[in-house]
Image (cartoon, rainbow, N blue to C red):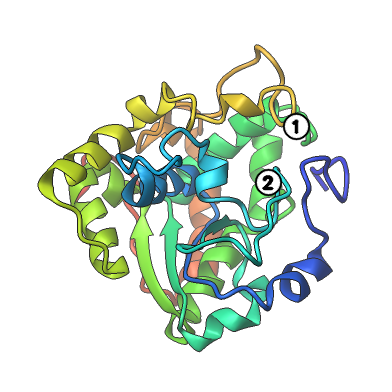
Amino acid sequence: SLLHEPRSSTGALPLWGWNRGFEEILFQIRLFSFPGTVWTQNILSLIYHEGHRDGTENMEIIDRVPWLEYNIHNMDYVHRPSPRLFTTHLPYYLAPRDLRNRRAKIIYVARNPKDVVVSYFHFSSLSVKLETVPDFNSFLERFLAGKVLAGSWLDHVRGWSTHRDEFNILFLTFEEIKKDLRGAVLKICKFLGKQLNEKELDTVVEMAAFDKMKSDPRANYEFMEGNLLEKGKGHFLRKGTVGDWKNTMTVAQSERFDNVFKEKMKDLSLTFIWDINDDI
């Protein structure tokens, strides 16, 4: 395991507690993802909180849209006021049973897995909770085998994709958000039944831009330095680009990845963008 401790100091729940502890919550909106979570987490927080002078505009992102499995600030999730927004990396098979009644709205975000593994490799070198892997090739093999925190990306995406009919779910990709942020925000608002006027929409799009988010102390996770990240070693938010895998992967590594990907995902209809110049 890449995780140093089975229950972290940030308040992570053990696996058995995820379902039993949250069955009584009336889930309203949930964000599921393996990668790309924090960006969409920020978009959701902006849609519901930015510009509304109700005391939430200065809250950190983890208080606006908290992590289900990492209750960092020990909040009362059961009695959390509406709207109940949660973020999680949970795979399909660990999702609380109550979500299958389709009352909750789920947003699932996927990212092209070559960028995922490169981003994850850099993150693991910053995290105080994860084992440092000596080189990218070693990390790539662990990633393909599902021997990383959060398990197999391939299984995660496959699970949610093949069971999507059981949920009220919107599938998005990191790449479509990157290529058309305004369009993605509108798509999310439509799915949630949330109407924003033009000024509110402009504010969300402006504040959700990756570079803007990277400099926003409420959203860039720099507040986790020391608790999650090693001090002075790097930034939680790195590039947020599409196709950065080409700057790290060798041709042989890319071909190795392609072979595993094609074999395990060949029967799924999902399409990924591997380069920013590719069409959606």
Q: Report the number of numbered marks.
A: 2
Q: Position of residue 91 (x, y in %)?
A: 62, 66
Q: Which residue is mark 1?
A: 133
Residue 266 is situated, as x and y percent measured from the top left of the image, at: 45, 71
* Amino acid carrying mark 2 in the image: Glu
Q: Position of residue 139 (x, y in %)?
A: 68, 39
Residue found at the very far top of the displayed protein: 232
Question: Going by the image, does 49 lie left or right of 132?
Answer: left
Numbered label attached to residue 141: 2
* Circle nearer the N terminus (2, 1): 1
Q: Residue placed at 56% from the left, 59% from the top? A: 260
Label 1: state its secondary structure. Answer: loop
- The foreground one among 274 and 17 is 17
| Image quarter (top left, top right, bottom left or bottom right) of the C terminus | bottom left
Q: Residue at x 51, y 88 (%)?
A: 101
Q: Quadrant of residue 121?
A: top right
Q: Can you give x and y, in whole percent of width and height, for residue 83 in the image?
A: 45, 62
Regarding residue 280, the answer to whether it shows in the image is no
Q: Residues within 10 Å of mark 1 (few under 14, many from 20)?
A: some
| Image disc number at residue 12 | none
> How would you rate the neighbour count of disc 2 (Cα within 10 Å): few for under 14, some for 14-19, many for 20 or more?
some
**Kind of residue at disc 1:** Val
